[in-house]
Image: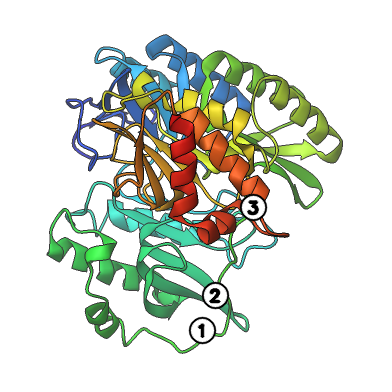
């Protein structure tokens, strides 16, 4: 048994709680919760692809008993429980173990939420992901790897992970009847640097070589730090020219209705990625009564309800919407990435969710889904660690407005909290008035440029 774990009977191991970690470079977990502005936070990745609604009722109950009752689903599809205290984390861990709900630990190995179920997928990613996890817990367990290292195994399908940034990616390809994996490092499917395409039988061995290269580069090394030419040489004996297949296209948003065979899947969005325990319990009990058998976490801050008959999907949609959840991919709030802000993070300098509410009420012309608007309480940019169409970032001097960059990039202008609503409303109006036929908000802003944004800022300050 791994050090730092205790097992009770046949229940999953209960992590022994270490000191809370304030470091962004370490993933918060039951064993090492992270201190935030509203207490301790833990991030959980269930071992089972999905949990029955009854387990979600229990998770919500435990979040209320041991934390502040706020649960979150992250952009990468992990579960977070907030507002815990030093004495309640071990109680939460023990209760989860007693219920038989176990979680992955260590390196994140991520697969599409519908792996093994989606008839549109190129391959079921779960067998390879399981083999990788076994290797990381066995022959590769001595490697020194970065705490936030991520490996994406993307078998494709409608909810594929083409837009997910990873240190190492394995993307499925078909060549005739054979399965291959394109291996790349340091990015999403478009931006990652390709290393080799290997046969399915060689994928684990090829990945092991890359992980050993990371180990050799030191415990802080990430995919972006790897020498691609050196890796190509190391994998040359495995590489194949069989690469005629195509990679998955950009994924659909999970929120909304999906058909899997004769059954329906309802993607349910948590508003800005968060839900209170009471609402989540009512939702899960209602979904169970409608026939849902399994609830899966999904990237893009969503839950997938599986097992619904075609006739029950509409009733499940109504239930979710009545409770304040999102069930449409075109819901304006889906275009906003927002962190906990000052309400839940010591680094947050303003109420990010209040600003998000202002945008969905008065600046919907910017929220057509063509770009992400990132609202970040500080320059760390935890909610969206990628370039966004627009970013509003808390700084000592005010709220920086960033065009086409990361939250911490140089700001085009600095706003007071009181001016944000007027500025963004003015910008939305300019986009609406000057948009060409068939043009998205993102393309309009790119065409109009920084001058139009500065004009909206000036008017908003008056």
Q: Residue at x 33, y 72 (%)?
A: 205
Relative to residue 52, is residue 402 drawn left or right?
left
Callout 3 crowding tier (Cα within 10 Å): few <14, some 14–19, many ≥20: some
Q: Residue 62: image x %, image y %?
A: 45, 16
Measure the C-alpha gap from mark 3 to mark 2.
42 Å
Q: Secondary structure at mark 2?
A: strand
* Label disc, if present, on residue 434 of the rendered structure: 3
Residue to which mark 2 is pinned? 173
- Residue 120, compared with residue 410, is above or below; it is below
Q: Residue 39: image x %, image y %?
A: 30, 17
Q: Residue at x 39, y 76 (%)?
A: 202
Callout 2 crowding tier (Cα within 10 Å): few <14, some 14–19, many ≥20: many
Q: Residue 65: image x %, image y %?
A: 43, 10
Question: Could one spot residue 97 in this view of the protein?
Answer: no
Measure the C-alpha gap from mark 3 to mark 1.
44 Å
Relative to residue 116, is residue 356 drawn left or right?
left
Mark nearest the camera among 3 and 1 is: 3
Mark nearest the camera among 3 and 2 is: 3
Instruction: Find out whether the residues at labels 1 and 2 contact each other: C-beta distance under 8 Å.
Output: yes
Front in this rendered view, residue 10 or 100: 100
Report the colour scheme. Answer: rainbow
**Mark 2 or mark 1, which is nearer the start of the sequence?**
2
**Mark 1 or mark 3, which is nearer the start of the sequence?**
1
């Amino acid at each position: 048994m791994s050090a730092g774990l205790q097992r009770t009977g046949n229940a999953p191991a209960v992590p022994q709680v270490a000191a809370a970690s304030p470091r962004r470079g370490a993933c918060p977990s039951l064993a090492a919760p992270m201190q935030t502005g509203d207490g301790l936070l833990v991030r959980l990745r269930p071992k089972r692809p999905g949990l029955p609604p009854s387990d979600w009722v229990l998770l919500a109950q435990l979040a209320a008993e041991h934390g502040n009752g706020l649960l979150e689903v992250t952009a990468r599809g992990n579960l977070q429980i907030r507002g815990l205290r030093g004495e309640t984390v071990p109680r939460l861990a023990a209760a989860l173990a007693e219920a038989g709900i176990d979680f992955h630990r260590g390196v994140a190995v991520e697969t599409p939420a519908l792996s093994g179920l989606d008839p549109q997928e190129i391959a079921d990613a779960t067998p390879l992901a399981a083999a990788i996890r076994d290797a990381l817990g066995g022959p590769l367990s001595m490697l020194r790897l970065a705490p936030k290292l991520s490996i994406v195994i993307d078998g494709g399908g409608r909810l594929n992970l083409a837009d997910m940034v990873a240190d190492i990616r394995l993307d499925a390809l078909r060549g005739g009847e054979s399965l291959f994996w394109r291996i790349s490092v340091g990015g999403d499917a478009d931006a990652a640097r390709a290393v080799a395409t290997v046969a399915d039988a060689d994928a684990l061995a090829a990945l092991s070589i890359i992980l050993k290269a990371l180990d050799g580069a030191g415990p802080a090394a990430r995919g972006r730090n790897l020498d691609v030419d050196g890796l190509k040489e190391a994998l040359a004996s495995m590489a194949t020219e069989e690469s005629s297949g195509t990679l998955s296209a950009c994924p659909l948003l999970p929120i909304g209705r999906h058909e899997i065979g004769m059954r329906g899947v309802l993607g349910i969005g948590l508003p800005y990625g968060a839900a209170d325990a009471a609402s989540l319990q009512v939702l899960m009990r209602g979904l169970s009564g409608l026939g849902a058998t399994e609830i899966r976490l999904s990237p893009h801050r969503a839950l997938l309800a599986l097992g619904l008959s075609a006739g029950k999907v509409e009733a499940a949609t109504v239930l979710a919407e009545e409770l304040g959840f999102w069930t449409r991919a075109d819901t304006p709030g889906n275009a906003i990435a927002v962190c906990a802000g000052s309400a839940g993070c010591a680094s947050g300098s303003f109420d990010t969710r209040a600003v998000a509410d202002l945008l969905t009420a008065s600046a919907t012309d910017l929220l057509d889904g063509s770009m992400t608007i990132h609202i970040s309480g500080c320059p760390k940019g935890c909610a969206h660690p990628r370039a966004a169409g627009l970013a509003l970032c808390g700084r000592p001097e005010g709220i920086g407005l960033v065009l086409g960059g990361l939250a911490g990039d140089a700001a085009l202008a600095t706003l007071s909290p009181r001016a944000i609503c007027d500025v963004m409303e003015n910008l939305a109006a300019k986009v609406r008035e000057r948009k060409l036929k068939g043009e998205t908000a993102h393309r309009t802003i790119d065409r109009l440029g920084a001058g139009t944004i500065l004009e909206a800022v000036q008017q908003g300050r008056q």
